[in-house]
Image: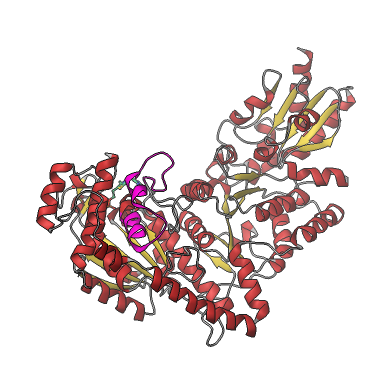
Amino acid sequence: MSVDNTQLANAIRFLSIDAVNRANSGHPGAPMGMADMAVALWQNHFSHNPNNPKWLNRDRFVLSNGHASMLQYSVLHLTGYDVSLDDLKSFRQWHSNTPGHPEIFETPGVETTTGPLGQGIATAVGMALAEKILAAQFNKEDYPIVDHYTYVFMGDGCLMEGISHEACSLAGTYKLNKLIVLYDDNGISIDGKVDAWFSDDTPKRFEAYGWNVIKAVNGHDTDAVSTAIDNAKKSDKPTLICCKTHIGYGSPKVDTAGVHGSPLGKENRQITAEKLGWEYPEFEVPESIYQAFNACEKGSAAEAKWNALFAKYEQQYPELAAEFLRRSRGFLPEDFSEKMDKFILDLQQTADNVATRKASEMVLDFVGELLPEMTGGSADLTGSNNTKHKSSRIFSHENPAGNYLSYGVREFGMSAMMNGMANHGGLIPYAGTFLVFSDYARNAMRLSALMKQRVIYVMTHDSIGLGEDGPTHQPIEHVASLRVMPNMMVWRPCDAVETAVAWQQALENNQGPATLALSRQNLAKPERDEQQIASIRKGGYVLRTGRDMTLVATGSEVELALSVAEKLADVSISAQVVSMPCYDIYRQQDEAYQEETIPSNKPRVVIEAGSTMIWEGLVANNGFVVGMDSFGASAPANILFEQFGFGVDTITERVKTFLQN
Ligand SMILES: Cc1ncc(C[n+]2csc(CCOP(=O)(O)OP(=O)(O)O)c2C)c(N)n1
Ligand SMILES: [Mg+2]
């Protein structure tokens, strides 16, 4: 039985047209333009098993131009994944597994959430990087247990976005030769013909990054695309295949922005069907085409072959094999939690008054040895973020088994790449920059949160406490703004012990990312008993008991709150002090615990050198917030704290006045 490639591509085209028509919303143009590229990739190259979308050694596919989601859903459906025709008919509807843009948690076979243009390609770079690292760490002669490609489709929009520069530049330097990117070069984006706003010489750009570039391939010639992929596989560099395509191929709206994001409609479907020789009604695909696409048998055979290889590997290298499976499943070693608890208790005795960024390094020295899957890095601030630890080995093309990356000054790219590593599995990525530059990374942090990926952001220099670098470097609103992000756990620890608990919680939570907001300056370690130490993980706990009122503080301001409580004691005001390193988690505690820590009938004052807005609810009508609602300034930290209202005497007086009124 032979079905010609054009008809296979037409099946993708018409499923896409029909689903978008039915939803009366969506993007038919790109799926129609990329359908032939898809046939070339899935018919001749893509190694996967629709019966087991999580097969560890599958090729990864990322649709960076996520608006073309119907292309991906059509392929998943046709190749035999659990994506039914009914699912396609429910495209973009409530509770369907075919949402507007691909979501990793909705659809089997979708490897990452895409839609924010540019991030898909950067995420894919992270996946290819993970493959390279894991291959170097686990493969043995004759046992290539980690050995797969990462394929990407991307459009003009991804190339215009700056993040594609960050990630592709690094992919070139790292020589990620198993990354193969197909560019949907259709000359159109939403505003029309791109020449007027996007005239880069894209091949030259990628050559300059050190990529293998295959130019001017006819994207509607499946043989040409397939040959290009063959050539890409032979390269020792990442490859960009520039596929010249026509958006909305075959329709009356071909080559226009009009077909980018609106349904074709019934009439245009009819005209297109006649032009392309597609004689089937809506949502109907002939059995011969299903058979030609179905990858279940081939996929099961490919997986079985790998399973056999892995079984032999397991015999030869039982410990490595067990470690590979543990890491791939995202489990921590069984005794991790216990070891960490003990480490935390010891820290209460042994730790000095250090900056929490330094404390974080101390924790990393400890956990780095226990968790070889931790893959660290920094956006060119290693010495400031203290992200490198005793067991760090620098990753490079020459040393791919490394576990530490100098990402260069690329906060957004770094964060999206970490998402890719987490999506891939086998690694726990963490990396640092200054907290103030979380804005640069932010949309990737948002995707970590949306995808519930364990990515750990080490964000240092967390307030005006960084001092002389001034307001451009002093985060004010960042802690608050990250706290409002769903699934993002934000920790702002006050000392080494809380920093260790923050790391423990971040590592043990494989249901979302964490941000650790850490100080540049040294902070005093408060006294605590075991019960208090055990309560840190509740997000907030009583450090000092008191009857009359409650002072709530985070991070560097905890020390300050304790001093204020001392001063208040001099005038017979008994203040309870609550340290609140993680407000998100504290809010999830039961009412009794919240009442015990912050009694609702007593006045309360929150002290945090950041935006006051998110604390308004906590102080309600019975208290106030000492915070920062303006930008900072350039001066030594102690002067800044005094000048911006964080002096012990200033706060003590404000509290006294409040209690008197
Ligand atoms: C970061 C980001 N900005 C804007 C958008 C909205 N958007 C979706 S598609 C698109 C145009 C993309 O052009 P191209 O990649 O060439 O897609 P084509 O029209 O060729 O399908 C825009 C601006 C987005 N999804 N992500
Ligand atoms: Mg385009």
Q: Is residue 75 magenta?
A: yes
Q: How many marks?
A: 0
Position of the C terminus by quadrant: top right
Position of the N terminus by quadrant: bottom left
**Above or below: residue 236 compared with residue 498:** below
**Above or below: residue 449 compared with residue 398:** above
The residue at the point 75 percent across, 38 percent down is: 558
Q: Position of residue 421 (x, y in %)?
A: 52, 62
Residue closer to the observer: 245 or 11? 11
**Above or below: residue 319 compared with residue 505:** below
Residue closer to the observer: 135 or 200? 135
Q: Tell me the magenta residue range.
A: 71-100
Q: Is residue 392 magenta?
A: no
Q: Position of residue 654 (x, y in %)?
A: 74, 22
The residue at the point 68 percent across, 66 percent down is: 371
Instruction: Using the rendered view, name the quadrant where residue 538 is placed.
Output: top right
The residue at the point 54 percent across, 87 percent down is: 141
**Residue 251 appears anywhere in the view:** no
Q: Position of residue 117 (x, y in %)?
A: 36, 51
**Residue 488 appears anywhere in the view:** yes
Left or right of 375 in this view: 120: left
Q: Position of residue 227 (x, y in %)?
A: 26, 77
Q: What is the residue that sits farthest to the top in this orientation?
A: 661
Left or right of 373 in this view: 233: left
Q: What is the residue that sits farthest to the bottom in this orientation?
A: 141
Left or right of 619 in this view: 593: right
Residue closer to the observer: 194 or 5? 5
